[in-house]
Every structure is written in C-alpha cells, then in structure tokens.
Amino acid sequence: MLRTPLCELLGIRVPLIQAGMSLYTSPELASAVSTAGALGSLGAWRRPADQLRRDLAELREATDRPFAVNHVVPDLDADAFEITLEARPALVSFALDDAGELMERVHDVGSLVMQQVTTVPQAEAAAATAAGTTPPASPGRPLCTAAIHPVAGSASRTGTQSAARARSATPGCEATRASHDGARPASSTDSTDSTS
C-alpha cells in the first residue's frame, strides 16, 4: 500500500482526499471514504446550517476516522463555518479564494487547513498567508494546487515551499505540501506517514 507524508499528517492509511463537492457529498459517502482509509469530505457550500449540523453528527457516528469539511470562501456561510469549527474535523478545506484569517480560526480549534486554488497567484497568496508575508505578483495560469497548512510548525518554510512549487507547476493538476514539523490532527489514530 502506498504510504506518504500526507498519511501521517492526516492520520489516514492511503493518500487520497475526497473532493468536497457541496451538496453532492453525504455523511454516508464521507464516512465510507474515511473508513476505507482515505480522507472523506463533507461539502458545506449551499448546505443549510441545520443540515450541516445533523450531517456532521451522522458522520461522527458512522466513523471514528479523520474527515474534512469543505467551504467556498466567496460564499461562506458564517453559521455553517461556526458549526464546522465546533465539529473540529481533522481538516477544513477552502476553495475559490484565500481563506485569510479563517485559517487561524481553524488552527485555533486544532484542525488542519487545506487551501484549494486554481491559479499560480492564488497559490502564492495562500502560501504568503500561511507564511505571514505579501504574495509576489505574477501572471495567473490555470492549475489545480492544494497546500495543507499545519496547526504548528514553520510557517515561513511552509509558505516558501508552497509558493516555489506553485511557480514551477506546469498546467494540469499538482498538489503542494506544507512541511508539518510533526503536527498531527487530534483525530489521528494509527498513522505513521504523510504527502503532497
């Protein structure tokens, strides 16, 4: 079985993360993915807050494995985000814009952050946010990049690595990994590896 640094970082057995996919995800799907050893995800976008609360409770009941909750930053539902923070998933992923100070709020509850981006400038902005610096200006080109920002560790090294990988990415889909210096999600139970 393939083991990577992502496995250790997230407490999963295989280096796969299910896409958030908004309402097209369910507690059943996310728990099946997590129970199988990958990281299941529940999409929060356009899911009513009361439904998200019920779905997260159902997901917790169905699996003791780590899972993620995905939010779309430009259309963030503040109530749904608070419910996510209360649930303390292993990872909170953000799509379509820089999560900015939302990352700190996620880290404050002990969860990891994954920033999904579609252009090099977005990747550089996400890396700069994690590093506490200003992103460099560069022309955008389509790509699929995700940077996982740890709860603890070297933020400036994280940002530098992510931005360097984003700048050198070729069109297509490439994942970047932040260094984690031993950070592990609270829900991690049996991992010994991690990834990109």
Image (cartoon, grey):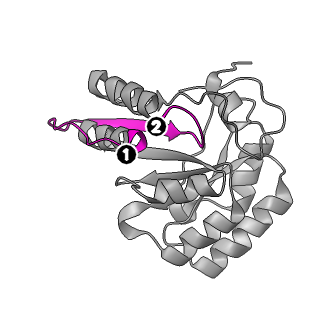
> Mark 1 touching mark 2, by CB under 8 A?
no
Percent from the top left, x then y, of residue 53?
69, 74
Q: Can residue 13 be seen?
A: yes
* Residue drawn at (45%, 46%) of the image: 115
Q: Residues within 10 Å of mark 1 (few under 14, many from 20)?
A: many
Residue bearing mark 2: 147
Disc 1 secondary structure class = helix
> Can you say whether 18 is above or below 63 in the image?
above
| Residue 156 falls in image quadrant | top left
Residue bearing mark 1: 129
> Can you say whether 21 is above or below 190 in the image?
below
Viewer-nearest residue: 86 or 30: 86
Percent from the top left, x then y, of residue 195?
59, 25
| Residue 141 falls in image quadrant | top left
**Viewer-side label of 1, 2:** 1
In the rendered image, residue 139 lying in the magenta stretch gets the answer yes
Q: Residues within 10 Å of mark 2 (few under 14, many from 20)?
A: many
Percent from the top left, x then y, of residue 61?
85, 62
What distance separates the C-alpha of mark 1 from that of mark 2? 11 Å
Look at the image and give the residue range highlighted in magenta. 130-155
In the rendered image, residue 36 lying in the magenta stretch gets the answer no
Give the mark nearest the N terminus, 1 or 2: 1
Q: Split into 4 quadrants, where in the image is the N terminus?
A: top right
* Residue drawn at (68%, 55%) of the image: 89
Viewer-nearest residue: 25 or 11: 11
Left or right placement of residue 155 versus residue 189 in this view: left
> Can you say whether 57 is above or below 17 in the image?
below
Mark 2 residue type: Ala
Left or right placement of residue 119 versus residue 178 in this view: left
Q: Can residue 70 be seen?
A: no
Viewer-nearest residue: 92 or 159: 159
